[in-house]
Image (spheres, grey):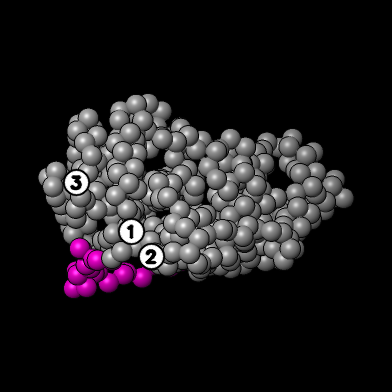
Amino acid sequence: MRPILVVMLLFFGYISPTPAQIQNGKIQSQSYAKPLGNKATVSLLTVSPGKETYAQYGHTALRVNDPENGFDLVFNYGLFDFNSPNFTWRFVRGKTDYMVGAYSYQDFLIEYQISNRAVYEQIINLNPDEREAVWQALAVNIQPENRIYRYNFFFNNCSTKPRDILVDHIKGKVDYKWNGKFKCLRDEIHFSTNKYPWTTFGIDLVIGAKADDRASLKSQQFAPELLMESFDKAIIFRDSSVSAPLVLKTQIPVTIDETLIEKPTWTPGPKMVLWIVFILVAGLSLMEFRKGKNYQALNAVLFTVTGLVGTIIAFMVLFSEHPTTDVNYLLLWLHPLNLIYAVCLIIPAFRKNLADIYLSINLPFQLFALAGTLFLPQYFHPALYPILLCLIIRSGLALVSLQKKRKHA
């Protein structure tokens, strides 16, 4: 249960602030209202993914550089405070508040030089009025009464906030000339976590069918690198006949030092581990069938684990405001009732009078879920097949054993 909660925390809140960021974010915002100089520039900064789970999607920020007024600031919408009241409970329910902070551009670069992550800068093609409008909008956002916003992983995050600040203050239409590269949001998540199979597996448990709906480019822009790519292709139409590129210039102030990249260590993925579990369960089940025994402990462990996972999924469906979690067909077989069944196995009266009723009802749902992988509108992670097959085998054997006992009673 705890590992899945950790995955949820790192997935739905994937930019974690350092104490230095929080401290530097307390720059007095009153000084920001001064108009920009003529040589000022506004840039979109994109940070390449890191190896930590929270960093696997990269990061986005806005840079405002004004040499005439003597400042060079980065506005970061990815800050949150673990010490805020009821943070964990609010996070699990999808009611996490993030904040925007501003700090030195050089501090920003140093942070990612230390972590060996590339930083890409796209200087945005804004006219003076648009540049000033963006600056004033940031000045408003950074005010203490405005800096906190309700975070949403897909639709209101550290990538979409800078996008909206820029696009909403361009006097014209931004045409991206592109539909993106992913069919659905789940495909985009898989792309970002493809080097980390356990992370992918954990995420596939808690996000449901809506993550498999066709995703618009705007939805796909929750990921920093795709936002950067879409900006690179975009064109501004300020009137019906004249167009201009959205990005004036792209530069890379921080590059990755290939010599510092650690070679990944091999660890078994979820498919290997869970198919090994299936082989063990199937072997024990065959032994049980031949010897006429009843391995209740094996059932208790299997149904306890799947019941705990099902409890998390059910909570996300019923009570969480996180996007794409409210419809999850895994609940057909990965549900909290498995936990109740496991607990009740120690109660003789339940085993004798109610266990076969539970199994008779639950087994058809498991079989339907297995068949439903062919037609239900939700991706089914391959590592889930061995777990579902384990449940089907154990449910079927337990049901047969109970019925035999009834006949001989």
Q: Can residue 51 be seen at all in this image of the molecule?
A: no
Q: Nearer the viewer, residue 246 or 54?
A: 246
Q: Residue at x 50, y 67 (%)?
A: 177
What's the mark number on residue 40? none
Determine contact: label 2, label 3, CB under 8 Å: no
Q: What is the C-alpha distance between the residues marked 2 and 3?
A: 23 Å
Q: Residue at x 58, y 55 (%)?
A: 211
Q: Amino acid at mark 3?
A: Gly
Q: Secondary structure at mark 1?
A: loop
Q: Secondary structure at mark 3?
A: loop
Q: Label 2 amino acid? A: Pro
Q: Give the residue at x 22% y 73%.
A: 258
Q: CA distance from mark 1 to mark 2?
A: 7 Å
Identify which residue is drawn at 51% across, 67% down: 178
Horizontal and vertical percent position of residue 379: 62, 61
- Toward which corner of the image does residue 186 lie, by quadrant? bottom right
Q: Which residue is mark 2?
A: 245
Q: Tag 2: Cα neighbours inside 10 Å, few (<14), some, or many (≥20)? A: some
Disc on the earlier residue, 1 or 3: 3
Q: Are marks 1 and 2 in contact (CB under 8 Å)?
A: yes
Asked if marks 1 and 3 touch (Cβ < 8 Å), the reply is no
Q: Amino acid at mark 1?
A: Asn
Position of 1 with respect to 73 (left or right) is: right
- Quarter of the figure with residue 369: bottom right
Image coordinates for residue 224, horizontal then vertical, percent: 39, 57
Where is mark 3, residue-wise?
37
Q: Which residue in the structure is indicated by mark 1?
A: 125
Whichever of callouts 1 and 2 sits on the residue coming sooner in the sequence is 1
